[in-house]
Image (cartoon, rainbow, N blue to C red):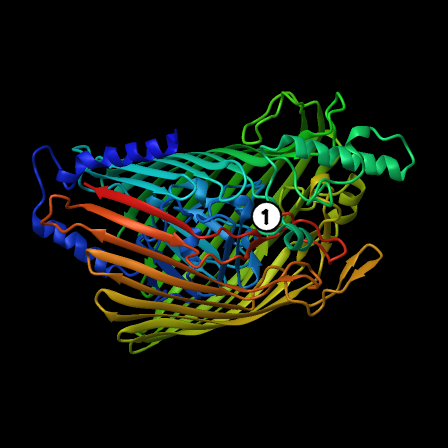
């Protein structure tokens, strides 16, 4: 019996009793047809993309409508990907599989940007995160009210020390003034079930507004064994205190994902896009390890440890690292914040936020590189993570004549850990890699990590008449990273700090009728990371050698453009020039399964230049076209020196950076019928730092079609929606760098992820 199908039917059945009175606000009371019609009109009129009018930098905002049209359960990054200059690849249809999702903007990768949720920092959103969490875990996508995206220079006030290349600021939905709620139920291919439910209290007599929501998400992988699961609970409260307001929220997430296998050009050519981990074929996984051990012994002229296995890999495999038995991850997060906003008087506002984040997680894989204590030729290797961070933000805004002055301060104290351990495997004991395992038989290292962040900013926006606005300011930061190794090799102890107390920005906008010109100059620094991806990925001797000479990554961004409003056509054209200095690259050698430390390489500078064009054409009230094109030329300015070896990277395009991105979509919404048809082209990308291995470009098509029952219907307030991802079933390589990046083809290993084939999902939604 397919329990998932039954659960999906039960979810829809849970919605059905509400269909006849889906718009009920209080017992026995239904809203007027005029109210429902107004809601339909709002849905039709809501803009998907707003092109940042009045901003001195290249910036766009996305409304909740951009997320709602996606398959439920999709990461909000999928909505951001429609913007110019933004490249997103994911090996799952939702963009929520963190290990196989990569975001890049203007040549900056995901960990070189800044991210916040209601002003609270999310860190650099890297998979093995040391200072935050992915937005897909931080909040249910249905609870996001909008996203502000800056492709170039991030704003001075954003709480981030990684935003070399812009920022993404996510805003959550506020509790509603009136009592209400929402229930969404989705069922789709690969036994996907996604349920979202939300209840809003409305404004209580005390002035309190409260919302409570939850997510249940289960989806089988599109290939191989296992599933991705998400459980979320989001709570938000708003309380009026005279003219002031207090907002608090707590978000809980339990995320489990079974990984897709990393591919290399060799395995892709030989075994194809459908290659995955072997689970549940345990016998083949054991045999691959045994044959590998026999080959090693045979080459050394020693007796074979597993004589019956022989020395030839079973077809179609040629190498023990072609694939493994199983791999997966586990993350549990609690993120919460409390914000007080206080109007001091008619010209001065103050706000303060306290936040806390707790994370416990693990990533595990069955490895043939380390045997279990009894000689069984497999074990489970895990990298285990913990984060416990507290922080505060304080801001003042003063309106003095034609000036708007802002002053802000951010402090964060983060205590984290990263451990590498191994767990025994046998024919009868096969640990679940999506659980937090206990009782390892071996640990390579146990480390405690600290990050102390202090950052301030000062800014002024000066209105010089009706046409001209000049904005400028500066920020400064000091971030100290520390490591204490309590056990293992490499045994590293010490601290390193990155600081720059003066990072200036200046920009201006000039309006000519309905047109607007803008220009901006900005400098930013990226702090070191308390991780083996950073300066701690070496020995104590190596750390001491680099501690006094290593320089943090910095960027200088110059950009300018034209925001146009030509009646039904609105959009932006932007040009940019970015100099990225002291770029630190982590080069890896050997198979990923060996867990070799990275070699941190300062490759000097990178130059990035390009153009971005985006526009919306409102053909008629219900029909609009959105299109964008981006050209990016990002290249390394210097060769890399790796010990005595010179790696020829000068003039080579940066890894995972497409030169061309072209996107187009048709949107229709008349208040009842709504839909979207989208196409996105991504050009060729480099897999290695030297550019001797590339992956081909590709074009993907997605589609959505939905219907809202009219206000005169008994089903008023109900929507149905159908989504298709990768409509033409294209084979392509999505994320790169899932197994890190390598210097050239001779050192290249498995580090590519295949994109998902066509997937179709159906949703029924009711709001009341």
Can residue 210 be seen in the rendering of this structure?
A: no
Q: Nearer the viewer, residue 54 or 134?
A: 134
In the rendered image, the vertical position of residue 505 relative to residue 275, given as above or below: below
Picture quadrant of residue 329:
top right
In the rendered image, the vertical position of residue 665 relative to residue 242, given as above or below: below
Left or right side of 521 for 690: right
Can residue 380 be seen in the rendering of this structure?
A: yes
Name the image quarter holding the C terminus.
Answer: top left
Return the x and y of residue 627 as percentages of the image width and height.
39, 69
Return the x and y of residue 407 as percentages of the image width and height.
43, 53
Picture quadrant of residue 400:
bottom left
Left or right side of 59 for 184: left
Number of numbered discs visible in the structure rendering: 1
Q: Nearer the viewer, residue 96 or 186?
A: 186
The residue tagged with tag 1: helix, strand or loop?
strand
Q: Residue at x 22, y 64 (%)?
A: 622
Q: Residue at x 22, y 52 (%)?
A: 707
In the rendered image, the vertical position of residue 717 relative to residue 203, given as above or below: below
Return the x and y of residue 61 as percentages of the image width and height.
37, 59
Name the image quarter holding the N terminus.
Answer: top left
Return the x and y of residue 733 as percentages of the image width and height.
56, 56
Q: Nearer the viewer, residue 288 or 72?
A: 288
Residue sitting farthest toward the right = 301
In the picture of the structure, the residue carrying the numbered disc 1 is: 478
Left or right side of 611 for 338: left
Picture quadrant of residue 112:
bottom right
């Amino acid at each position: 019996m397919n329990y998932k199908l039954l659960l999906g039917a039960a979810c829809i059945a849970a919605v059905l009793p509400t269909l006849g009175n889906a718009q009920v606000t209080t017992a026995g009371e239904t809203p007027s047809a005029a109210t429902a019609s107004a809601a339909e009109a709002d849905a039709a009129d809501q803009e998907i993309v707003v092109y940042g009018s009045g901003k001195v930098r290249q910036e766009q905002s996305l409304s909740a409508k951009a997320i709602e049209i996606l398959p439920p359960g999709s990461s909000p990054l999928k909505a951001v990907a429609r913007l110019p200059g933004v490249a997103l690849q994911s090996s799952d249809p939702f963009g929520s599989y963190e290990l196989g999702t990569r975001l890049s903007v203007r040549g900056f990768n995901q960990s070189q940007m800044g991210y916040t949720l209601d002003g609270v920092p999310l860190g650099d959103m890297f998979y093995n995160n040391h200072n935050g969490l992915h937005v897909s875990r931080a909040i249910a996508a249905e609870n996001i009210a909008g996203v502000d995206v800056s492709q170039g220079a991030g704003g001075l006030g954003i709480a981030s020390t990684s935003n070399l290349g812009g920022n993404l600021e996510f805003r959550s939905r506020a509790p509603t003034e009136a009592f209400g709620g929402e229930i969404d139920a989705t069922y789709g291919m690969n036994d996907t079930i996604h349920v979202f439910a939300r209840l809003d209290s409305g404004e209580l007599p005390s002035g309190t507004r409260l919302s409570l929501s939850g997510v249940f998400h289960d989806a089988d992988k599109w290939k191989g064994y296992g599933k991705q699961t998400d459980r979320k609970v989001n709570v938000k409260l708003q309380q009026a205190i005279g003219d002031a307001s207090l907002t608090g929220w707590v978000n809980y997430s339990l995320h489990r994902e079974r990984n897709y296998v990393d591919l290399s050009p060799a395995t892709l050519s030989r075994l194809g896009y459908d290659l995955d981990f072997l689970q549940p074929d345990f016998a083949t996984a054991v045999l691959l390890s045994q044959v590998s051990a026999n080959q090693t012994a045979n080459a050394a002229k020693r007796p074979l440890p597993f004589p019956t296995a022989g020395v030839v890999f079973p077809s179609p495999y040629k190498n023990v690292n072609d694939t493994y038995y199983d791999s997966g991850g586990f993350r549990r997060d609690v993120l919460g914040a409390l914000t007080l906003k206080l109007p001091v008087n008619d010209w001065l506002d103050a706000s303060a936020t306290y936040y806390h984040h707790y994370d416990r997680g693990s990533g595990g894989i069955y490895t043939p590189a380390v045997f279990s204590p009894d000689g069984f030729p497999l074990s489970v290797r895990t990298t285990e993570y913990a984060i416990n961070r507290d922080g505060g933000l304080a801001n003042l805004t003063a309106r003095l004549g034609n000036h708007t002055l802002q002053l802000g301060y951010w402090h964060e104290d983060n205590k984290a850990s990263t451990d590498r351990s191994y767990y025994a495997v046998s024919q009868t004991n096969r640990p679940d890699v999506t659980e937090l395992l206990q009782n390892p038989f071996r640990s390579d290292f146990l480390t405690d990590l600290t990050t102390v962040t202090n950052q301030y900013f000062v800014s002024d926006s000066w209105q010089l008449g009706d046409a001209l606005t000049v904005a400028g300011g500066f920020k400064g930061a000091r971030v100290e990273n520390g490591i204490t190794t309590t056990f293992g090799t490499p045994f590293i102890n010490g601290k390193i700090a990155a600081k720059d107390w003066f990072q200036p920005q200046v920009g201006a906008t000039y309006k000519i009728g309905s047109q607007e010109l803008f220009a901006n100059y900005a400098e930013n620094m990226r702090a070191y990371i308390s991780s083996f991806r950073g300066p701690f990925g070496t020995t104590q001797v190596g750390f001491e050698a680099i501690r006094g000479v290593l320089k943090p990554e910095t960027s200088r961004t110059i950009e300018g453009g034209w925001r146009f409003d030509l009646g039904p056509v609105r959009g932006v054209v932007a040009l940019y020039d970015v100099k990225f200095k002291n770029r630190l690259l982590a080069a890896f050698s050997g198979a990923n399964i060996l867990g070799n430390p990275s070699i941190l390489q300062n490759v000097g500078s990178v130059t990035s230049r390009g153009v971005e064009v985006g526009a919306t054409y409102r053909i008629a009230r219900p029909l609009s076209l959105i299109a964008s094109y981006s050209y990016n030329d990002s290249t390394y300015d210097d060769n890399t020196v790796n010990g005595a070896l010179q790696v020829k990277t000068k003039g080579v395009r940066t890894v995972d950076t497409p030169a061309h991105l072209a996107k187009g979509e048709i949107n229709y919404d008349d208040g009842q019928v709504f839909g979207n048809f989208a196409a996105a082209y991504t050009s060729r990308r480099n897999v290695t730092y030297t550019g001797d291995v590339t992956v081909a470009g590709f074009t993907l098509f997605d589609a959505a079609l939905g219907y809202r029952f009219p206000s005169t219907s008994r089903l008023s307030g109900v929507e149905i929606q159908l989504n298709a991802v990768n409509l033409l079933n294209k084979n392509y390589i999505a994320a790169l760098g899932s197994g890190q990046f390598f210097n050239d083809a001779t050192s290249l290993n498995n580090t590519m992820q295949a994109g998902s084939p066509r997937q179709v999902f159906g949703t029924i939604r009711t709001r009341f």
